[in-house]
């Protein structure tokens, strides 16, 4: 029981962030272990043997932990930490996000292409609408509005990958929109996206669970600006619509 008589929920494990000192569930934390040579190694899957230290998935906190020698205090030893650990973590987390989408696609639990995504949203089959960070604002806003209306606030909206990274997950040059079915892949995608968002300024999430960055559930991320339904990244040439 916690103070005030409220029963503490022990269903989810909690760990303490070595940078902030705050405890929380592991969805937004990254585990680190020491290599035999005393180097700090990220354990993104949380399965490597040995004593672990946990750090909130946030670029500024990673840099602060390095500067303040928080890893040495956590492991009670002199450790070696790469100066570009924050950049390494971003790359590793982006790879895990791409792999999650790829696995979902191979399992038939994810689709890409504006029309396929639109159909899945209208049928109410989607748990997540994922869109590229460099997609055209008006095209993104249209599908977001549809997700809000069709899902009645239950569909999570995530933007953490760029169009090339999303395309890699779907075996094509680029992809702007994707929809994931409810289930294990959607849950994993939310966890990976939450961690990756701490390293990308352009990342935006509006999760149906209520854990979002700067948004309220059911609030559109952007308003519709025009009738152009372009699927091409905003920095590139216009390409085939159904991506």
Image (cartoon, rainbow, N blue to C red):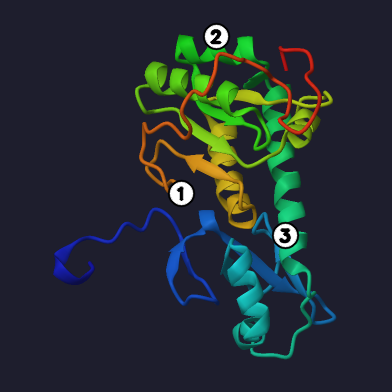
Q: Quadrant of the C terminus?
A: top right
User: In the rendered image, which residue does mark 1 sit on?
Assistant: 213
Q: On the picture, is 110 further left or further right than 125?
A: right
The front one of 131 and 151 is: 131
Query: Alpha-carbon distance for marks 1 and 2?
Result: 27 Å
For mark 3, give the secondary structure: helix
First of labels 1, 2 by sequence position: 2
The numbered mark at residue 89 is: 3
Query: Alpha-carbon distance for marks 1 and 3?
Result: 20 Å
Q: Quadrant of the N terminus?
A: bottom left
Residue 51 can be seen in this image: no
Query: What is the quadrant of residue 185 in the picture?
Result: top right
Residue 87 to residue 53: above or below? above
The numbered mark at residue 119 is: 2
Q: Position of residue 199 (x, y in %)?
A: 64, 56
Q: On the picture, is 115 further left or further right than 35?
A: left
First of labels 1, 3 by sequence position: 3
């Amino acid at each position: 029981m916690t103070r005030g008589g409220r029963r503490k929920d022990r269903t989810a494990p909690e760990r303490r962030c070595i940078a902030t000192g705050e405890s929380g569930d592991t969805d937004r934390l990254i585990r680190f272990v020491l290599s035999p040579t005393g180097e700090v190694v990220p354990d993104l899957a949380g399965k490597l043997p040995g004593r672990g230290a946990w750090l909130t998935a946030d670029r500024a906190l990673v840099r602060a932990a390095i500067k303040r020698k928080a890893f040495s205090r956590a492991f009670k030893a002199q450790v070696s930490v790469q100066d570009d650990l924050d950049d390494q973590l971003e790359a590793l987390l982006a790879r895990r996000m791409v792999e999650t989408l790829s696995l979902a696609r191979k399992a038939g639990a994810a689709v890409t292409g504006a029309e396929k995504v639109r159909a899945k949203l209208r049928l109410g089959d989607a748990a997540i609408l994922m869109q590229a960070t460099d997609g055209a604002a008006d095209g993104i806003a249209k599908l977001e509005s549809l997700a809000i209306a069709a899902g009645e606030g239950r569909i999570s909206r995530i933007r953490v990958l760029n169009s090339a990274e999303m395309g890699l997950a779907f075996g094509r040059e680029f992809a702007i929109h994707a929809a994931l079915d409810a289930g294990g892949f959607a849950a994993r995608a939310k966890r990976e996206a939450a961690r990756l968002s701490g390293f990308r300024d352009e990342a935006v999430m509006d999760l149906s669970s209520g854990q979002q960055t700067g948004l309220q559930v059911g609030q559109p991320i952007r308003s519709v600006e025009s009738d152009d339904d372009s699927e091409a990244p905003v920095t590139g040439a216009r390409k085939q619509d159904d991506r």
